Image (cartoon, rainbow, N blue to C red):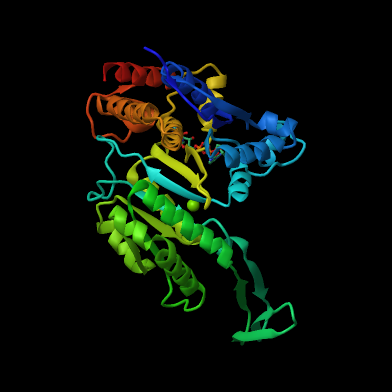
Amino acid sequence: MSKIQMITPLVEMDGDEMTRILWKMIKEHLIIPYVDLKTEYYDLGLEYRNETNDQVTVDSAEATKKYGVAVKCATITPNAARMTEYNLKEMWKSPNGTIRAALDGTVFRAPIIVKGIEPCVKNWEKPITLARHAYGDVYKNTEIKVPSAGKAELVFTAEDGTKTVETIHTFNGPGILQGIHNTDKSITSFAKACFNYALDTKQDLWFSTKDTISKKYDHNFKDIFQKIYEEEFKEKFEAAGIEYFYTLIDDAVARVMKAKGGFIWACKNYDGDVMSDMVSSAFGSLAMMTSVLVSPSGVYEYEAAHGTVQRHYYKHLKGEETSTNSIATIFAWTGALRKRGELDNIPELCAFADKLERASLKTIEDGKMTKDLALITSLENVTVLNSEDFIKEIAKTYETM
Ligand code: NAP
Ligand code: MG
């Protein structure tokens, strides 16, 4: 059988540790046999990032802007321990942070649903995708520990010197203070990324804030979303048969617990941080969670939501067998290949991505899985496979379909 041809290369960002090992196996057993794979390769493994003073990360982000679609392996974000382990010249920044900043993107995280791994919330039948605004609020705050009685004020000085002053509180004794901000530009990018992603995936979009209490700050988020919706997206949403729906965060939380799923939930930075961890763990496993960074200009970067699975890698280095789940990394590849197929109008490539996803899930549903899933599955008599045999088993399933 002849291999599927590609037109534009994918930007391939290789990574670290156990996921770097899985990366190679996925390409070898699941992709290269079927696709005449065209990629522009960037090695974001920590050694090469250090060697290039992190220039390779910047270059990979630029290439993503140029070509439009990237697939990324998990990478180490250096900390003090990694400085010694890899003899680093500097504590390089998180590659995801660098890429997110370059693409001005929003991250969408969605669980992969499979029979036998049941969500804790019984009525969740379809994925709930979390869209988290990744700029400002409490993550870029300024705080003061108030030592004694006194008056706290919020002051804004315009470029022409005009001052706006509000009293925050008159303290009778010690306390605490916090200043936070956001920008209309960042909120606008966030809103556009959410509306575009909803259209792209044909799912309803929910957005929630605490605008009843925060009548200016949170209300501004609500107003910007509403304005952009009406000006740019209302007609497109109606044509696609999907809805935009704003509600108070308390109401959203209550509705999410009773919903069937199948929608995108856009959240402010803090809400998204907390709620994405809750939703992902309630769906079962970090190893079954995908992540895609979407820029307002329509550039896509696909990856797994989990890290480099360091503990498994150290076992692997000692020659011990590992059973690391490659599903989220496989789905990063299929997501990127499908998007490339859509953009370049290669239906065979989209069909390949769909079939590889079905083969991956069928393998699990047939009772063949990695240890992390075997521990939580409702299926009986399952076979626990090691990292490589699981990937090879998916290839076998693919051949039978
Ligand atoms: P991690 O790699 O996500 O792994 C944490 C634990 O979760 C593992 O020890 C394992 O549990 C389980 N796990 C995660 N993925 C799994 C998979 N595919 N299959 C089976 N089990 C899986 O997080 P970490 O160990 O805290 O971080 C390791 C490195 O990853 C760090 O250097 C961090 O900077 C980096 N990181 C990168 C990204 C990214 O590139 N997007 C994201 C997060 C973290 P058991 O040990 O119990 O089996
Ligand atoms: Mg969190």
Q: Nearer the viewer, residue 78 or 305?
A: 305
Task: Pick the residue in front: 203 or 385.
Answer: 203
Task: Tell me the quarter of the picture where residue 345 sits.
Answer: top left
The foreground one among 49 and 312 is 49
Q: Is residue 132 left or right of residue 254?
A: right
Marker count (numbered): 0
The quarter of the rendered structure image containing the C terminus is top left
Q: Is residue 220 visible?
A: yes
Q: Position of residue 375 (x, y in %)?
A: 33, 32
- The residue sitting at 65% across, 85% down in the picture is 164
For residue 268, above or below residue 305: below
Q: Looking at the figure, which quarter contains the N terminus?
A: top left
Q: Residue furthest top?
A: 1
* Residue that sits furthest to the right in the current view: 89
Q: Position of residue 229 (x, y in %)?
A: 41, 64
Q: Position of residue 354 (x, y in %)?
A: 33, 31
* Vertical arrangement, residue 169 with respect to residue 349, above or below: below
Q: Position of residue 14 (x, y in %)?
A: 58, 29
Q: Is residue 149 visible?
A: no
- Please indicate whether residue 256 sits to the left or right of residue 200 in the image: left
Q: Residue at x 30, y 63 (%)?
A: 254
Q: Residue at x 41, y 40 (%)?
A: 289
Residue visible at 55% across and 26% down in the picture: 39
